Image: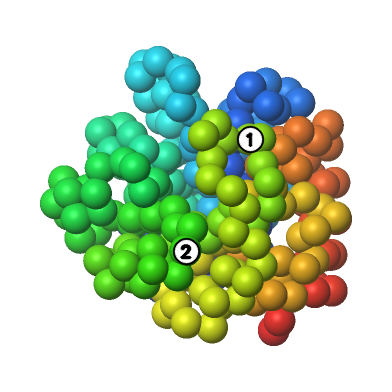
C-alpha cells in the first residue's frame, strides 16, 4: 500500500477513466497512455458496467499501476477494491458513510470523499478521509446528477483551511486549468479533457506545461 502522505506527491494530474466518453472507448488503453505519460494516480470510475466487467478491468489496471508505481483508486466499489488489492476507494456524499467504509477496509486503505462545501470538507477531514475531491469547479456533463458548480471560492477555502490532500475536479479543461492551479490546487482531475483526446500523451505534455506556468510552488 502507498503511504497516505505520498498520495498526491508530484501529482499535478489525477487520472480518471470514462470509457463511454473516451476517444478510444478502451479504459485499459487510456490508463496505459496516462501511466506512460507520468500520471501518478488513476481512479477507475464505471457506474453502469456489470460487476464482472469492472472486476476484470480493475485486475488489469491494478497490475499496470503497480508496475508504474502509481496509486490505484476505485470509485464506489469497496468489495472490488479489496478483491483486486487496490490502494483505496473514492466515495460521494450519498454513498456508504466514510466511517462504515473505514470499518470494512481497515486503516491501511486510502479513502477519498467528494465534497462540495466548506462544511463537508471540514467534516471529511474530521472523519478521517485521506483526501477530498473539491468541486465541481465548473459545470460538467461527465457525471449524472451532479450538483451545481461550487466555483473557485470553494477552492480558495480548501487550499487555505483543509490540512489533508485534495484534488480539484469538475468541468476542468485545458483552457481553465491554469486558474485552478493559480487558486491553490496542487492536483486537478480532467476527465474528458484527457480520455477524450486522440493523443493522451501529447495532451498530458500540454497540461504539464500549464501546471509549470501556473501552479503555486
Indicate the position of residue 30 as horizontal and vertical percent values: 66, 33
Q: Is residue 8 above or below residue 72?
A: below
- Left or right of 6: which side holds 178? right
Residue beneath label 1, please? 142
Q: Residue at x 39, y 55 (%)?
A: 113
The local secondary structure at tag 1 comes to loop
Which tag, 2 or 1, sits closer to the chain's start? 2
Local crowd size for mark 2, using a 10 Å CA cut-off: few (<14), some (14–19), many (≥20): some
What kind of element bears circle 2? Answer: loop
Residue 80: tell me if it is visible.
Answer: yes
In this figure, which residue is indicated by the disc labeled 2?
Answer: 117
Q: Position of residue 19 (x, y in %)?
A: 61, 25
Which corner quadrant holds the N terminus?
bottom left
Tell me if residue 111 comes above or below residue 154 in the rendering.
above
Q: Residues within 10 Å of mark 1 (few under 14, many from 20)?
A: some
| Alpha carbon distance from label 2 to label 1 | 20 Å
Residue nearest the viewer, comparing 107 with 179: 179
Amino acid at each position: 500500500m502507498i503511504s497516505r502522505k505520498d498520495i498526491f506527491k508530484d501529482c499535478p494530474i489525477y487520472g480518471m477513466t470514462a470509457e463511454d466518453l473516451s476517444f478510444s472507448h478502451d479504459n485499459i488503453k487510456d490508463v496505459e497512455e496516462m501511466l506512460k505519460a507520468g500520471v501518478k494516480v488513476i481512479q477507475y470510475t464505471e457506474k453502469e458496467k456489470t460487476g464482472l466487467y469492472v472486476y476484470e478491468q480493475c485486475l488489469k489496471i491494478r497490475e499496470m499501476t503497480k508496475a508504474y508505481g502509481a496509486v490505484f483508486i476505485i470509485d464506489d466499489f469497496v468489495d472490488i477494491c479489496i478483491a483486486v488489492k487496490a490502494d483505496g476507494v473514492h466515495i460521494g456524499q450519498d454513498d456508504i458513510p466514510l466511517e462504515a467504509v473505514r470499518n470494512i477496509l481497515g486503516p491501511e486503505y486510502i479513502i477519498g470523499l467528494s465534497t462540495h462545501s466548506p462544511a463537508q470538507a471540514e467534516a471529511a477531514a474530521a472523519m478521517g478521509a485521506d483526501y477530498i475531491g473539491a468541486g465541481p469547479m465548473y459545470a460538467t456533463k461527465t457525471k449524472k446528477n451532479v450538483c451545481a458548480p461550487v466555483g473557485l471560492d470553494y477552492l480558495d477555502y480548501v487550499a487555505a483551511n483543509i490540512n489533508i490532500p485534495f484534488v480539484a475536479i469538475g468541468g476542468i479543461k485545458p483552457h481553465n486549468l491554469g486558474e485552478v492551479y493559480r487558486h491553490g490546487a496542487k492536483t486537478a482531475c480532467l476527465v474528458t479533457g484527457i480520455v477524450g483526446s486522440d493523443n493522451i500523451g501529447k495532451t498530458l505534455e500540454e497540461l504539464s506545461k500549464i501546471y509549470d506556468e501556473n501552479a503555486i510552488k
